[in-house]
Each structure stands twice: as structure tokens, then as C-alpha cells.
């Protein structure tokens, strides 16, 4: 399962029609993100507003939930066997709050990572 986290959004407006605004948005995404190795797991969504001749590009990053869950379980089992010195752990009584917090933290880090790259690149242009 994947969780999407919004990184940023950008609006594009054209005086003539929404199609030209959409082309501007696609070019912007292609030039900034598609051709850059640093952005390896981004997704883009375009929302069009025909009455305003506007397109909004929404950029998302993904977090793979199963990978985080597997790492969490591995650490929990290792900790349980080392601290309590037994391997009779009960996964049914797992504290999923910690698991949920880890997912949120990874999502926050990924969002900040991509935002930092994007805004630093803008400063250097």
C-alpha cells in the first residue's frame, strides 16, 4: 500500500484558454521534475478550472507503507528478544500508534526533502 503526501502545488493561467495553461503546467513539471534524478518517486495531478483558464499542478511523493511496517516489526522483534531475552512476543498486541507515527514521520521527511530541493533549485536559477 502506498500513501501519497502532497509536496507542493503550482497554478498556471493563460489569457486565451485552459489548454495552453495545461501545456504550461506540463512543461513546468517536465523541466523541473521529470528530467531530474533527485525526484525519483513523484506523482503529478492536474486540476483544470475552465471558467478561469487555469490549471493547478499538484505534486505528490509516495510512502510505501508495507516497507515501513516490515522494518518496524523487525526492530520490535529484535528489541523484544534482546531486552526481554525471549522470543515469545505477541504481535497481536502490537502498538500501531508507533507504527502510524513512523509513517507520518517518513512522509514528513520526504515532503521536506523534495520541497528543499525544489526551493533551493529556484534560488540557484
Image (spheres, rainbow, N blue to C red):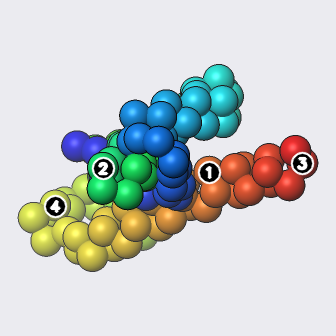
Residue 100 is left or right of residue 15, and the answer is left
The residue carrying mark 3 is: 124
Q: How dense is the environment of label 4, judged by Cα within 10 Å: few (below 14), some, or many (20 and up)? A: few
Q: Residue furthest right?
A: 124
- Real-space Cα separation, disc 2 to disc 1, in angstroms: 30 Å
**Depth check, front residue: 66 or 87:** 66
The N terminus is located in which quarter? top left
The answer to which of marks 4 and 1 sits earlier in the sequence is 4
SS state under label 2: helix
The image shows residue 100, relative to residue 8, as above or below, that is: below
Task: Please report the residue visible at 37 percent of the width from the left and 72 percent of the height from the top.
Answer: 101
Q: Real-space Cα distance between discs 2 and 4?
A: 52 Å
**Where does label 1 land, which residue?**
114
Count up the numbered dots: 4
Q: For mark 2, what is the residue?
A: 50
Q: Are marks 1 and 3 in contact (CB under 8 Å)?
A: no
Residue 96 vertical placement versus 40 (above, below): below
Can residue 71 be seen from the camera position used here?
Answer: no
Q: Mark 4 touching mark 1, by CB under 8 A? A: no
Amino acid at each position: 500500500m502506498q500513501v501519497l503526501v502532497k509536496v507542493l502545488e503550482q497554478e498556471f493561467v493563460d489569457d486565451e484558454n485552459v489548454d495552453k495553461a495545461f501545456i504550461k503546467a506540463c512543461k513546468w513539471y517536465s523541466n523541473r521534475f521529470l528530467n531530474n534524478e533527485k525526484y525519483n518517486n513523484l506523482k503529478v495531478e492536474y486540476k483544470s478550472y475552465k471558467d478561469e483558464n487555469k490549471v493547478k499542478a499538484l505534486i505528490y511523493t509516495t510512502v510505501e507503507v508495507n516497507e515501513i511496517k516490515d522494518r518496524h516489526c523487525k526492530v520490535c522483534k529484535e528489541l523484544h528478544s534482546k531486552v526481554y531475552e525471549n522470543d515469545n512476543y505477541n504481535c497481536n498486541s502490537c502498538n500501531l500508534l508507533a507504527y502510524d507515527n513512523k509513517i507520518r514521520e517518513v512522509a514528513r521527511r520526504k515532503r521536506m526533502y523534495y520541497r528543499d530541493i525544489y526551493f533551493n533549485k529556484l534560488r540557484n536559477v
